[in-house]
Amino acid sequence: MPITIGRLSLWIIAGLLTIILLMQDKMPVTALEKTAVMIATDNAGRKVEIPRQPQRVIVLNASNLDLYYAAGGEVVGKPTTKALRPEVSQAVAAIPAVGTTANPSIEQLIALEPDLILGVNAPPHHALIPVLEKAGIPILLQTLENYQQILDTLALYGLLTGKQSLAQAEIDRIEAQYQAVRARVSGKEAPRVLVVWGSTESFNMATANSFAGDLVKRLGGVNVADEQITASQLRYVPLSMEFVARANPDVILLITHSTDEKVVGKLRSDLIKHPAWQGVKAVQNNRVEQLPYALFAINPGTQVGEALVILEKLLYPDDGD
């Protein structure tokens, strides 16, 4: 009899273990993982307690949504934007929009009951912090102002989604593109470059601290705007037509806030027809180039490799392309 009872007990225990294992297979995240938290320092310098693997994420701008999706993430709220690449746009087509990046709806954010919001380190999202804190909703303010921050953000999102290998594969793909471009331009004569941010209201010059300026520097270009700055952290400085005439760049790259071709054409025309620029090499040699809005007016996220290839062709055009 003792032997029979012992065997029966073992069978019962084995059956219970099997049921538990089968249940775990159907649960992508355990209860412990759902409640586990970690402290993250965002790009605003804030230490924020966030879920280790959040389950209800809202992303407030296109670039971060692109990166979060590439790291295997799913969202419950998205920004109102036309800047997403087709694959991401299709994947989030049924997801509720919470307003534009510059003007998200705080009511919609709270109504969706997120356990994490991914925003940008900019005044409109800083303004959300007090209300979100009262509602117990953490928000990370991210900055994507250079190439390295794209890779770092992908790594963070891989940690949050629990899909580090997927995020690392995307990082490796981007790095391979970058190294290939670097190898092709290595040893070539460095062009003098001016990057102009333009709108109907004003023009600014982008320094090496800006996203486009960082890519230009990585490809060996000499950014003439850096000769104008006195504060090392400035990303943009006002455009001086006379300074540009003296700096005499080989190529001028134009980024505009508008996608309207008529507006873009007029901005470019106003620049190249300015009397002070008639002796500038870039104007004389017809090398005032418009950069694609989707890759340079906003951070390109996972498409940064494509942005690098475009810059390569504009900075070093004498390769028979």
Image (cartoon, rainbow, N blue to C red):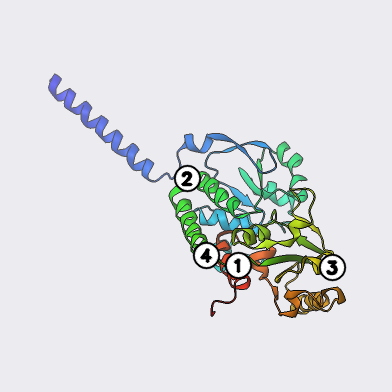
Horizontal and vertical percent for residue 245? Answer: 81, 69
In this view, the residue in front, 61 or 284, is: 284
Query: For the residue labelled by badge 2, is the local secondary structure a helix, a strand or a loop?
Result: loop
Number of dots carrying numbers: 4
Q: Do the residues under discs 3 and 2 have CB atoms within 8 angstroms?
A: no
Query: Which marked residue is nearer to the observer: mark 1 or mark 2?
Result: 1
- Separation (CA) of disc 1 from disc 4: 15 Å
Disc 1 marks a residue whose amino acid type is Glu
Disc 4 marks a residue whose amino acid type is Val
In this view, the residue in front, 31 or 187, is: 187
Q: Is residue 248 above or below residue 56?
A: below
- Separation (CA) of disc 3 from disc 4: 32 Å
Q: Which residue is mark 4?
A: 181
Query: First in sequence: mark 1 or mark 4?
Result: 4
Query: For the residue labelled by badge 3, is the local secondary structure a helix, a strand or a loop?
Result: helix
Camera sees residue 307: yes
Query: First in sequence: mark 1 or mark 2?
Result: 2
Q: Which residue is mark 2?
A: 162
Residue drawn at x 54%, y 76% is 319
Query: First in sequence: mark 3 or mark 4?
Result: 4
Horizontal and vertical percent for residue 73? Answer: 52, 52
Q: Which residue is mark 1?
A: 189
Q: Is residue 20 left or right of residue 153?
A: left
Query: For the residue labelled by badge 1, is the local secondary structure a helix, a strand or a loop?
Result: loop
Query: Which marked residue is nearer to the observer: mark 3 or mark 1?
Result: 1
Q: Which residue is mark 3?
A: 241
Residue drawn at x 68%, y 37% is 46
